[in-house]
Every structure is written in structure tokens, then in C-alpha cells.
Amino acid sequence: MNETIPTKEDIIERANTTTSRLEMTLKKYQRYSSISNLTRIILSSSIPVLVSMSSHNIKLLIFVSLAGALLSIIQGVDSFYDLSNKMSDIKQTILFINKETLLLSSNNDPYDAEKDEENVQKFIANLAGALDDELSNIDN
């Protein structure tokens, strides 16, 4: 069972792949957040209009109630999934991976140009240590 340590190029490629996946997840969360925010704006602004119109047509109060209920549901879902914190965590993770990749590829501190195998081990240890908590929070 002879396991070899990946080369510096392999590990940088894997880091870039991970960054790409995180960026896709970030875009998905941003889309959900935008839709949620726009829907809340529309519902919030429609309630006063519907209330003022309900004096002429009492049946419009049903739509006011539905808009209020939908507003509450959307707010509850947003709070439950905590998309803004997840987006922030993903952005920090992407920045961290990009920083470490740049340091590794340019052989800047803590990476030494003379020790490729040791650099890869440091890189893996740095990423694993820093990203354990953040990546587990992304999918929850």
C-alpha cells in the first residue's frame, strides 16, 4: 500500500476545483436570497395598497391576510436556513483557499521553494484545519 503525496500542481488543481464548486454554491444561495428579498419587498408594499382598497371591497382582506402569511413564511425560512451567514462563510472559505493557493504557487511564507513535498503537506494541513468547521456549516 504505497500512497504518494499529490504534487504541488495536483493539489493546486484540486483547490481550484473546490473553489469553483463553492462559487457555484454561492451563486445559488445569492439567487435564493435575491428572490426572497424581492418577494418580501413586493408583499410588504402590496399590503398597504390592498388594505386601502379593501374599504371598497371587503374580499381584498383575504389577499392582505395571504400576503402577511407569505411574508411570515418567507422570513421564517430565511431565518431557518440562515443564507446570509452561509454566503459569508463561503466567501471567507473561497478567499482562504485562494490565498493559500497563491502562497503555495509563489513559494511564499510558510511555503519553501526547496521543499515541494513538505509544502503540499503544509498546504493540506492548513486547509483541513481551517476549513473543517466552515465546510460543515455550508450544507447544514
Image (cartoon, helix red, strand yellow):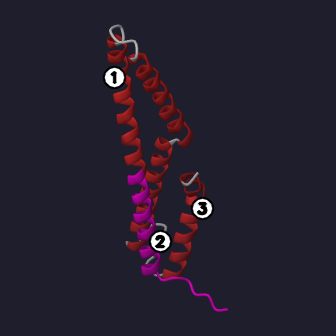
Q: How far apart are marks 3 and 2 (CA)?
A: 16 Å
Between the C-alphas of marks 2 and 1, the distance is: 55 Å
Disc 3 is placed on an element classified as: helix
Characterize the magenta stretch by its predominant secondary structure: helix
Residue 66 position, x and y percent, is 46, 26
Q: Residue furthest top?
A: 55
Would residue 108 be seen by someone viewing this image from the given angle? Answer: no
Instruction: Say if 5 sits above or below 131 in the image.
Output: below
Q: Residue 45 carries which label?
A: 1
| Residue shown at 59% from the left, 56% from the top | 136
Q: Is residue 126 above or below residue 68?
A: below
Q: In this view, does 40 lie above or below 45?
A: below
Counting residues from the start of the chain, the first of labels 3 and 2 encountered is 2
Picture quarter with the N terminus: bottom right
- The residue type indicated by label 3 comes to Gly
Which residue position holds label 2? 111
Look at the image and say whether residue 77 sits in the magenta stretch: no
Along the viewing direction, whichever of 130 and 60 lies nearer the viewer: 60
* Residue placed under numbered mark 3 in the picture: 129
Q: The residue under label 2 is which amino acid type?
A: Tyr
Give the magenta part as a residue range.
1-28
